[in-house]
Image (cartoon, grey):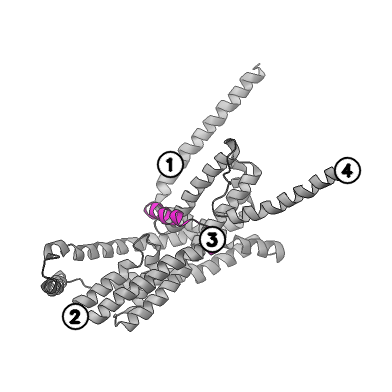
Amino acid sequence: MLTEKEQEKKEIRHKYILIGFLILLGLIIFRHTRPYMSGFLGAATLYVLVNGQQKFLTQKLNFKKSLSALLIVLEVLFFILLPLTGLTFLVIDTVSGISINPEAILLQINEFVDTLEERLGFNIFTPENLAALPRVGSNILQLLGNSVYSFVINVIVILFVLYYMLFNNDTFETAIREVLPFKEENKQILAEETRMIIQANAVGIPLLAILQGFFAYLGYLYFGVDNAILYAILTAFATILPIVGTMIVWVPLGITLLLGGDYVNGAALLVYGMFIIGGVDNVARFLLQKKLADIHPLITVFGVLIGIPMFGFWGVIFGPLILSLFILFFNMFRHEYVPGSKAEPRVTTRIKSRKMKIPMVDSVKPKKKKEKRTGH
């Protein structure tokens, strides 16, 4: 017979062996499902956005889980995924049809640079320095073409995974809560933080893209850019790029107009892009996210820089989420284990937490007054 301590040590040993097996199998599964990770992340994002509908249909309207999950998946397919897929194919098809003539580009660049250098009186550029531009364009087109297959496959993965997440939503959420090594209050905070960050990026980024695409379309149309609607869509997609953002579209368009001899419209488009399109990018991005969730701008910028190389398109959402969770866990550690720390165990919902603390302070004061009265 084993003693109580020996039995306890054996159970702990078995526990860590089981955790080791879970980690090992998890790494194997992750390695072989890595190409479909965008689909899993997309399903998780959409689950956060539409899970409220699932609960309303099943709890309030008494729909069967299978029927309500199917209806929501069809809603996501027709109102989110199909329009997004259509826009993606439109851009790829149009851009892939553009023929790049390096000799013509270099000839226009030479003429423009010669004119500019003649007026300024000194050399600025050389054709050798600018010869890489056509190659950059070709690489972008090749990258777009290679992404089509992955995009379609991940859309299918999103639909299947989302359906089963909605169908088993109660079991799914309970399992996550059970394995989180936090007390109940911190589990609730973590759920709120995750939901707020995902909603802020999943709702705010499309709104910003539509807004910037609209203003860009007006500018391209007014300044005589061919295929204005196409470049407006490209500008909308470029909002997900950190730092450079929409400049990757309107700066080359303005330079192209200048190279073509249209100096007025070219210069005007560059000014319009800097102050109007760029203004919407720099101001509306953070205003929308501040309205939806109190995300610090640095978390957004560096989160996107981290997330896009890791997760592709969905890195726009999950990059800031990972960075925010790191800061959240750091604040939780300070709050729980550092004596005298004033850290709040929150990142994006600090305003809400402050509002929740006010009634608690008010409720303490009357009790103190009552104690003084009874003492007399």
Residue that carries the numbered disc 1 in the rendered image? 28
The Cα–Cα distance between marks 4 and 1, rounded to whole angstroms, is 67 Å
Give the quadrant of the N terminus.
Answer: top right
Tell whether position 96 is magenta.
no
In the image, 294 versus 362, the foreground residue is 362
Residue that carries the numbered disc 3 in the rendered image? 199
- In this view, the mark in front (3 or 4): 4
In the image, 273 versus 99, the foreground residue is 273
Find residue 226 and report its image quarter: bottom left
The reply to whether dot 4 and dot 2 touch (C-beta < 8 Å) is no
Whole-percent x and y of residue 206?
47, 67
**Badge 2 amino acid:** Gly
The residue at the point 55 percent across, 40 percent down is: 334
- In this view, the mark in front (3 or 2): 2
Tell whether position 307 is magenta.
yes
Residue that carries the numbered disc 2 in the rendered image? 261
Q: Is residue 181 above or below residue 248?
A: above
Query: Start and end of the magenta stretch?
Result: 291-310
- In this view, the mark in front (1 or 3): 3
The Cα–Cα distance between marks 3 and 2, rounded to whole angstroms, is 46 Å
Whole-percent x and y of residue 147?
34, 61
Q: Counting other residues with Cα less than 10 Å from the Cα at mark 1, is it few (<14), some (14-19), or many (20 or more)? A: few
Residue that carries the numbered disc 4 in the rendered image? 374
